[in-house]
Amino acid sequence: MLEPTDLTVRATDGLHTTFGTVATVVGRAPGRVNLIGEHTDYNAGLVLPVALPHATYAAAAPRADGVVRIASAQEPEPFTGHVDELGPEIDGWAAYVAGVLWTLREAGLVSGGLDMYLESSVPLGAGLSSSASVECATAMAALGVAGRALDEDLQRAVVAAGIRAETEVAKAPTGGMDQSVAVFAEAGGALLIDFASGEHRSVPLALGDRTVLVTDTRVKHQLTDGGYASRRAQCEKAAADLGLRSLREATVEQVETLDDDLVRRRARHIVTEIARVEPTVSALGAGDWAAIGELFAASHASMRDDFEISVPELDLAVATAVDAGADGARMTGGGFGGSIVSILPAAAVEAVSGAIDKAFAEAGYGAPGHLIASPSAGAMFTEVTR
Ligand code: ADP
Ligand code: MG
């Protein structure tokens, strides 16, 4: 993985090489891995993500003419527009970037043009939220360029601007977990977020000799192709059939009364998954790795059988990780591909990652990628001094 200083230099150099512009600000926002609580954010439930050390860096400088030029090391075609003409009709990757400039402008937080260059160490489309990472890095850079001071109100505005860009411009109907953790994560902790109250708190992770390993199956998910939206609609139907505002208010017994088998299974995943989050916080605090194993196994089975968002590559990676010595493993993120998360003794990382590589080769799958998720801090911007 490239270090933060390398990525900052790459972003500022990229801005200069691409546009001939000298950066005044660099925004940074991390990707994330969710430890537990999947598809619960848009059901007013609980989630427990960790910010990755992998992050997007956005180097930027103001322009007096209102022009917006954005390029990314991860995408071939730059975006060009004018700040007064931005709107929800922005296609492709720029939806996540120019889309945020539009939503920030709508919120009255930025008004001028800028040049921006993005560089990232978050794998794209791996279920590790490169999307929220790029949205929040963009927002941080734009707010830095606008001369704003970062306080909690502004942090909340960044989360909101990212969610609006993702849902209204990129048209991926995700909940708010990714932007919340990208902004509010604290180094060394996971972020427990309650989407009923809107509150969040950092849960220190005393991992001891344990490590969080992420394995990217490299099966590309696509959150805009309908699988995610259909799950969301089924959850809303379940809540409506039960006469509830959201599935957060439902009990397992109530869910079992739902007539439609599909809707019942979708709702059962949400209700049981929400109920697994606080026990996971307790087990992590107590170093009860056997309990983590059970909670992760139940979560994975629920996503595979009831919510039906797993794929064979995720199932194989999870089973292999546990066989090779992980305390627990489960698929993580929106599903239909992407990554798994394992908690395991640090001494077992080589054995577990090697076993997954071997199992994938034997199954005829492409090679997966592995990364260590040491819990990292949320988004910020720094002024470039010279
Ligand atoms: P995930 O968030 O799991 O990585 P998504 O499909 O939600 O996957 O978001 C991935 C998309 O976000 C990419 O296809 C691209 O459009 C955009 N994106 C992410 N990172 C960058 C980046 N560094 N530069 C440009 N676009 C990016
Ligand atoms: Mg995403």
Image (cartoon, rainbow, N blue to C red):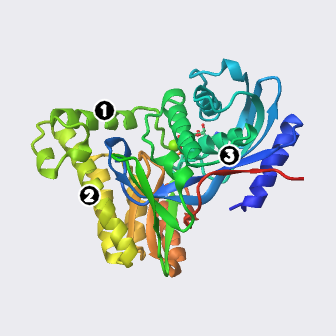
Residue at 45% from the left image edge and 74% from the top image edge: 344
Separation of marks 2 and 1 at Cα, in angstroms: 21 Å
Q: In this rendering, which labeled residue sits more in front, label 2 or label 1?
A: 2
3 or 1: tag closer to the N-terminus: 3
The amino acid marked with disc number 3 is Ala
Helix, strand or loop at label 1? It is helix
> Which quarter holds ligand 1?
top right
Residue at 38% from the left image edge and 33% from the top image edge: 229
Separation of marks 3 and 1 at Cα, in angstroms: 39 Å
Question: Does residue 239 lie above or below 119 as drawn?
Answer: above
Q: Nearer the viewer, residue 275 or 245?
A: 245
Q: Residues within 10 Å of mark 3 (few under 14, many from 20)?
A: few
Coordinates of residue 165 in the picture (x, y in percent): 55, 32
Separation of marks 2 and 3 at Cα, in angstroms: 38 Å
Q: Is residue 368 visible?
A: no
The amino acid marked with disc number 2 is Ala
Mark 2 and mark 1 in contact? Answer it, CB < 8 Å.
no
Which residue is disc 3 drawn over?
Answer: 149
Q: Which quadrant would residue 274 be assigned to in this image?
A: bottom left
Which residue is disc 1 drawn over?
Answer: 233
Most distant residue in the top direction = 85
Coordinates of residue 273 in the picture (x, y in percent): 29, 54
2 or 1: tag closer to the N-terminus: 1
Residue at 38% from the left image edge and 53% from the top image edge: 312
Is label 2's Cβ within 8 Å of ligand 2?
no
Residue at 68% from the left image edge and 62% from the top image edge: 1
Label disc, if present, on residue 275 of the rendered structure: 2
Coordinates of residue 134 in the picture (x, y in percent): 62, 43
